[in-house]
Amino acid sequence: MSNECAEETQFTEDGSLTLKDEQTGELYHNRAGAYTEALANFVEPLKLYELAGEAGQLAFLDVCFGLGYNTFCLLNELSKLALVTDSIKIVAIEKFQKPLLYISRVLSDERFRKLSEEIGSQAPCLAAGKFGTWEFQLQCKTRKVCVRFELVQGDLRQIVPPLVERDRGIFDGIFHDPFSPRRAPELWTIDLFECYKRMLKEPNGKVVTYSAASAVRGGFCQSGMLVRRTPAVGAKSGGTLAMLPSIACPEENGLPLLSDESDKLAGRAGVPYRDLHFCKTAKEILRAREAEQKLQFPY
């Protein structure tokens, strides 16, 4: 998550760092722990062990990179595997410079010790939170793997649509981690999710997000993706896992939606946010959704 108004650091229950955004009042991460949330809500649902035997490039997209916990946890977990691939591609999108200034503090966490040494010695500009393309060798279980890390600055609504043509069908996993839908509906539209769908690798590409909002899940469903939930982390419900319809065993990924969650998806709450040309304001998107809800569910 990201915003230029983030000011003070806070420590979450697992000892990891987060920031509070003054404009929205939201923390960048769950109070249960930035590291814990990244691991349980984002990395573990990708089932990385299933990717270990793939000879081709592994690729991941991190939208709203923020402090970098999702990607750093991803690389940490990949380093524990006997990977066959020679390369890992990371594309990370972040609008603001400020959260990147804390990357060195995030990497100082003992849980990132080996990764921190590799990035610090081979890609110091990445450790310093600078935008650009950086490379380093990640020592995995049986070999070193080249990581090509693109840290891109900009509004995800302007970056993602053009990215579809360049990176169509290459991503094994996409992390979607903006501020909450109620605060920033323009970052949770079905139009954006349709871009993700085209960028996922067949047949097992996945999108993961912490949000369990019905409008979000409705957007994934109406874009033609299969939706499951992820385990709860310091909350009453888990996040969302969206998969390509071509996935071999969807029932073996994530958890089934609860009955009340499925009911909401079929009703007014499941109507997605829309922004076809990626230019509407949050108020315009909310008003359009309300109108669509009244049209589809007049009573």
Image: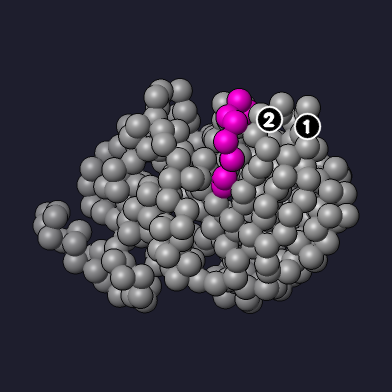
Majority secondary structure of the magenta segment? loop
Whole-percent x, y for residue 137 in the image: 78, 45
| Magenta-highlighted residues | 52-60
- Residue type, mark 1 in image: Arg
In this view, the residue in front, 51 or 11, is 51
- Residue type, mark 2 in image: Leu
Above or below, 132 against 80 in this view is: below
Residue in the image at 65% along x and 34% along y: 85
Quadrant containing the C terminus in the rendered view = bottom left
Residues at badges 1 and 2 in contact (C-beta under 8 Å)? yes
Please give the residue where the numbered disc 2 appears in the rendered image.
83
Above or below, 168 against 76 in this view is: below
Q: Which SS class for mark 2?
A: loop
In this view, the residue in front, 128 or 265, is 128
Whole-percent x, y for residue 242 in the image: 41, 41
Residue in the image at 62% along x and 48% along y: 89
In the image, is residue 55 part of the stretch drawn in magenta?
Answer: yes
Q: Residues within 10 Å of mark 2 (few under 14, many from 20)?
A: many
Whole-percent x, y for residue 84 in the image: 66, 29
Mark earlier in primary sequence (1, 2): 2
Distance, label 1 to label 2, CA atoms, is 7 Å
Whole-percent x, y for residue 49 in the image: 62, 27
Residue in the image at 33% along x and 59% along y: 191
Quadrant containing the N terminus in the rendered view = bottom right
Please give the residue where the numbered disc 1 appears in the rendered image.
143
